[in-house]
Amino acid sequence: MKPKKKKTDPQPKLFDEGGLKDWQGGEPAEDPQPDGATYEPEHDRVRLTGLLDAVFQFMFDGEWRTLAEIRAAINRGTETSISARLRDLRKKKFGAWTVDRKRIGNPKDGLHAYRLVGAHQPQETT
């Protein structure tokens, strides 16, 4: 007898057919795009918005993760580009998410973990 598959909620998406979803009750940009001096939409848009959505989907549960853990799980991008996408999520045009960061391990190693905090979960109080 086969084990029953658990029914899971569909993965959240940052974007839908109409553009950026209004996750937090604000006014998202009509057509948000990454930016920067070297950004060329015809070459970079699909790759970077796809990576942004992959990072968002993986981090949506609010768990703490290192850049290496995120990279291994989504199997795309570099740790540097994932770090940039986490910074993008903090921007108003991408939903103004709170991305918490904490130092882990030996402080001299400079290793950090990140988590996405949003309207779907309460923030920790310390």
Image: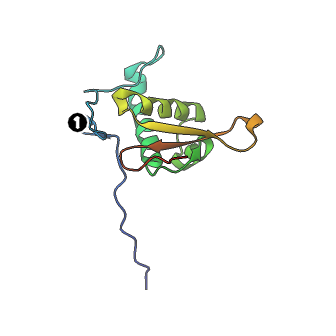
Q: Report the label total.
A: 1
Q: How is the image coloured?
A: rainbow
Disc 1 on helix, strand or loop? loop
For residue 126, side relative to residue 117 (left or right): right
Pick out the residue farthest to the bottom: 1
Question: Which residue appears at 52% of the width and 41% of the height?
Answer: 76
In the picture of the structure, the residue carrying the numbered disc 1 is 18
Q: Is residue 74 above or below residue 28?
A: below
Q: Amino acid at mark 1?
A: Gly
Question: Which residue appears at 58% of the width and 31% of the height?
Answer: 80
Pick out the residue farthest to the front: 126
For residue 19, side relative to residue 46 (left or right): left
For residue 112, side relative to residue 21 (left or right): right
**Closest to the observer: 99 or 38?**
99
The N terminus sits in image quarter? bottom left
Q: In x, y percent, where is residue 114?
A: 55, 41
Q: In x, y percent, where is residue 27?
A: 25, 30
Pick out the residue farthest to the top: 37
Q: Quadrant of residue 17?
A: top left
Question: Which residue appears at 45% of the width and 52% of the height?
Answer: 61
Q: Is residue 47 above or below residue 118?
A: above
**Closest to the observer: 92 or 36?**
92
Q: In x, y percent, where is residue 14?
A: 35, 40
Q: In x, y percent, where is residue 45?
A: 39, 27
Q: Quadrant of residue 18?
A: top left
**Closest to the observer: 40 or 26?**
26
